């Protein structure tokens, strides 16, 4: 079980480390109780969303119109089902909505209708309310710290085009990857997006192949999962989470594979040839379901990225 607290420039490492530890502990308790990787991954991200220190759920960055609009996604490597929500303003835990949509993929709706994989805005909120997820007033999603940062930066600019993103908040999408005793593997992520983003913007945390990816390859007994953080538009253009997993599944050396994926699929990508500052980070697991062996990997192009990890054989999580 591993949790990731975005890539950026962290000012309070102690606070972020505490949140990562709690997320790992809570998720491991789920596994101890017989829960699945999907249960544990969701639980870890719920803890991260509930902390006002993170840019996910309550306390997310505010958009240009001073509103919280959350993105989240989750993918089950066994079923290959994916669920996501975007521009959510009043669902306390967007990852729980994404998880519900992911699981709902396995059964057709009435009259043979295909269930939705991604829901947006008011439709997402209505669905969350219908299935019993916690809904809160939109203003309750705004933390004092997020409001303070918004007021500070918004007072300095008059037009969206004047924003210098490098001076804004860290790109601290949160995410988690998990493998359970049955070998099932899951990845998920959640984000409030860029500070002062345009209303309606969709980030990588709600995009298929970009925010998270998980795959169990029955032919090789290998499984891999990855969640990403960073410049959402760049991660979407490169389908970076999927590229990381696909390359890990067929590799001989996970470390070399990760390095080459960053180099060739991101930093040297033809889709990003005109970009100079490409901020990204990832957390990945590769696991052999036959032998029970695995590797945990992470990487980032930013100054820092906080990660925590723990297994059921450990008494406490490790955080870096």
Image (spheres, helix red, strand yellow):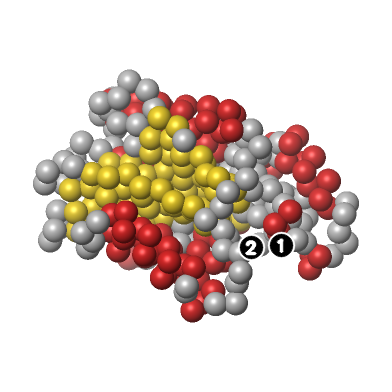
The secondary structure type at the circle numbered 2 is: loop
Task: Write the residue at 60% across / 77% down.
Answer: 274
Q: Are marks 2 and 1 in contact (CB under 8 Å)?
A: yes
The x and y percentages for residue 80 are 29, 58
> Can you tell which quarter of the image residue 116 is in?
bottom left
Q: Report the residue marked by disc 2.
A: 201
The x and y percentages for residue 214 are 32, 54
The answer to whether any part of residue 157 appears in the image is: yes
The x and y percentages for residue 13 are 59, 33
The secondary structure type at the circle numbered 1 is: loop
**Above or below: residue 306 compared with residue 256:** above
Front-most of 155 and 168? Answer: 168
Count the marks: 2
Q: Residues within 10 Å of mark 2 (few under 14, many from 20)?
A: some
The answer to whether any part of residue 185 appears in the image is: no
> Can you tell which quarter of the image residue 105 is in?
bottom left
């Amino acid at each position: 079980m591993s949790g990731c607290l975005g890539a950026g420039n962290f000012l309070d490492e102690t606070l972020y480390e505490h949140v990562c530890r709690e997320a790992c502990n809570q998720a491991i308790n789920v596994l101890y109780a017989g829960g699945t990787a999907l249960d544990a991954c969701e639980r870890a991200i719920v803890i991260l969303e509930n902390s006002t220190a993170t840019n996910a759920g309550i306390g997310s960055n505010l958009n240009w119109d001073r509103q919280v609009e959350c993105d989240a996604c989750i993918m089950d490597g066994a079923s290959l089902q994916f669920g996501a929500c975007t521009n959510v303003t009043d669902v306390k835990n967007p990852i729980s909505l994404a998880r519900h949509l992911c699981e709902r993929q396995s059964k057709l709706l009435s009259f043979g209708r295909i269930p939705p994989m991604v829901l947006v805005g008011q439709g997402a909120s209505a669905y969350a309310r219908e299935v019993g997820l916690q809904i809160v007033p939109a203003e309750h999603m705004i933390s004092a710290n997020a409001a303070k940062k918004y007021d500070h930066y918004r007072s300095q600019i008059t037009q969206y085009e004047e924003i210098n993103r490098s001076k804004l908040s860290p790109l601290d999408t949160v995410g988690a990857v998990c493998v359970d005793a049955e070998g099932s593997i899951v990845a998920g992520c959640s984000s409030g997006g860029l500070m002062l983003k345009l209303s309606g913007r969709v980030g990588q945390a709600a995009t298929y192949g970009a925010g998270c990816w998980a795959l169990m390859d029955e032919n090789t007994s290998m499984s891999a999962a990855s969640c990403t953080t960073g410049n959402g538009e760049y991660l979407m253009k490169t389908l970076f989470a999927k590229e990381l997993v696909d390359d890990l599944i067929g590799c001989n050396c996970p470390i070399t594979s990760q390095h080459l994926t960053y180099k060739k699929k991101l930093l040297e990508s033809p889709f990003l040839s005109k970009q100079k500052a490409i901020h990204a980070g990832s957390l990945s697991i590769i696991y052999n379901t036959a032998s029970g062996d695995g590797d945990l990997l992470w990487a980032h192009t930013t100054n820092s990225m906080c990660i925590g990890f723990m297994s059921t054989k450990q008494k406490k999580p490790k955080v870096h």
